[in-house]
Image (cartoon, rainbow, N blue to C red):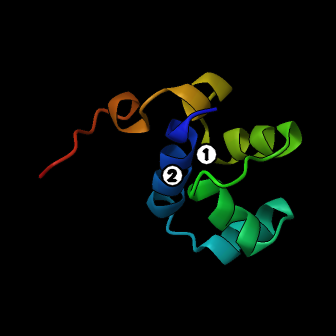
Amino acid sequence: MNNKFSQNLKKLRKDYHLSQEQLADEIGVSRQAISKWESSLAYPEMDKIIILCDKFHVNIDDLLHKDIREINGEEERN
């Protein structure tokens, strides 16, 4: 996996107005796990990826490989 997953997870979590701790509680992991995933220091197991996809209404390919901003029709504004 590349850092697209990390970037996408962080964006989706923020779009859903969730803290790392809230998301962790909802999917059954520690807040530190979410932090590591968002920092590309670790990656979730497949069952957690599926839970994230269901929660955020995205498919696995989009979550892991695409730019979520492009999929949602957003562009980065500088």
- What element does badge 1 sit on? helix
Residue extending furthest toward the left: 78
- What element does badge 2 sit on? helix
Give above or below for 6 relative to 2: below
On the rendered structure, is 23 left or right of 30? Answer: left
Residue located 22% across and 39% down the image: 75
The CA span between labels 1 and 2 is: 7 Å
Where's residue 28, x and y in %? 87, 64
Give above or below for 41 relative to 68: below
- The residue pinned by badge 1 equals 56
Does the CB distance between marks 1 and 2 fall below 8 Å?
yes
Task: Name the mark on residue 12.
Answer: 2
Residue located 22% across and 44% down the image: 76
Closer mark to the observer between disc 1 and disc 2: 2
Where's residue 67, x and y in %? 41, 32
Residue neighbourhood size for the residue with mark 1, other residues' Cα within 10 Å, grouped as few (<14), some (14–19), many (≥20): some
Give above or below for 9 relative to 57: below
On the rendered structure, is 63 left or right of 77? Answer: right
Where's residue 7, x and y in %? 48, 47
Task: Name the mark on residue 75.
Answer: none
Q: Amino acid at mark 1?
A: Phe
Q: Nearer the viewer, residue 33 or 55?
A: 33
Q: Earlier in the sequence, mark 1 or mark 2?
A: 2
Report how many numbered discs are placed on residues in the image.
2
